[in-house]
Amino acid sequence: MSDIKLIVLGSPGAGKSECVYTKQMNVDGRLTGLEIYDPCSQKLSMSKELSRADGFLIVYDISRRSSFVFAKTIICSLREANVRMCRRDTEAGLFLIGNKQDLCHMREVPQEEAQKVALEHRCHYYELSAAEQCQEVNDMFTTIVRNIILQNKIKDKRRPSGSMAKLISNVFGKRRKSV
């Protein structure tokens, strides 16, 4: 079983209410432990939490432009810091999420604008209503977990072998039999 740890960031009132949430999911026949953490304080200097994150969910309210501006600030802060302390590749781990789609009649942030920001900052983008679209929220988390697992597999293939014998063998050729 693999574990995926996500941190939820965004302005107060954007629709992120959990402090810590854990769940086991079956994604493509693979049992995965999912931990979602909302640090509540929104201080990005929490190196312990950032260093253990596989991904960041940056949530904004589509009916409040100020929450979108705050979300962009968070993305820029994560990118500027290059998230060196994050144990995973942030290309796979940044998700911009427009919440409260049920308030589309009060929309202040056009979907096209949010998609453009996500593209510019190399984030994945979702828009949904956490209050009304339970299945879409579940599908989003399944897609996020699937994406992170795939990126981790790609990253693991690029890693050099950890065995000293294999390293020496790669540098100096095959090992000779002892006499």
Image: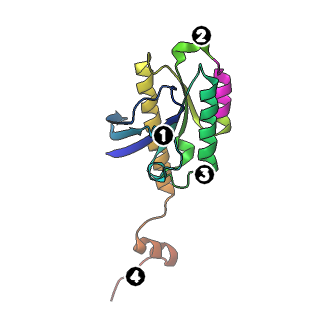
Real-space CA distance between mark 4 and mark 3, rounded to the nearest whole angstrom: 44 Å
**Can you say whether 159 is above or below 59 in the image?**
below
Q: Nearer the viewer, mark 4 or mark 3?
A: 3
Real-space CA distance between mark 3 and mark 2, rounded to the nearest whole angstrom: 37 Å
Mark toward the start of the polypeptide (2 vs 1): 1
Extent of the magenta region: 108-118
| Pointer 4 residue | 176
Real-space CA distance between mark 3 and mark 1, rounded to the nearest whole angstrom: 21 Å
Real-space CA distance between mark 1 and mark 4, rounded to the nearest whole angstrom: 59 Å
Classify residue 30 by image quadrant: top left
Real-space CA distance between mark 2 and mark 4, rounded to the nearest whole angstrom: 74 Å
| Residue 41, position as x, y percentages in the image | 48, 40
Residue at 40% across, 82% down: 176
| Pointer 2 residue | 105
Residue at 46% across, 54% down: 156
Mark toward the start of the polypeptide (1 vs 4): 1
Amino acid at pointer 1: Ser
Mark toward the start of the polypeptide (3 vs 2): 3
Q: Is 114 contained in the magenta span?
A: yes
10 Å crowding of disc 1: few (<14), some (14-19), many (20+):
few
Q: Secondary structure at mark 1?
A: loop
Q: Is 47 contained in the magenta span?
A: no
Mark toward the start of the polypeptide (4 vs 3): 3
The numbered disc on residue 82 is: 3
10 Å crowding of disc 3: few (<14), some (14-19), many (20+):
few
* The furthest residue to the bottom: 179
| Pointer 1 residue | 41
Along the viewing direction, whichever of 97 and 145 lies nearer the viewer? 97
* The furthest residue to the front: 41
Amino acid at pointer 4: Arg
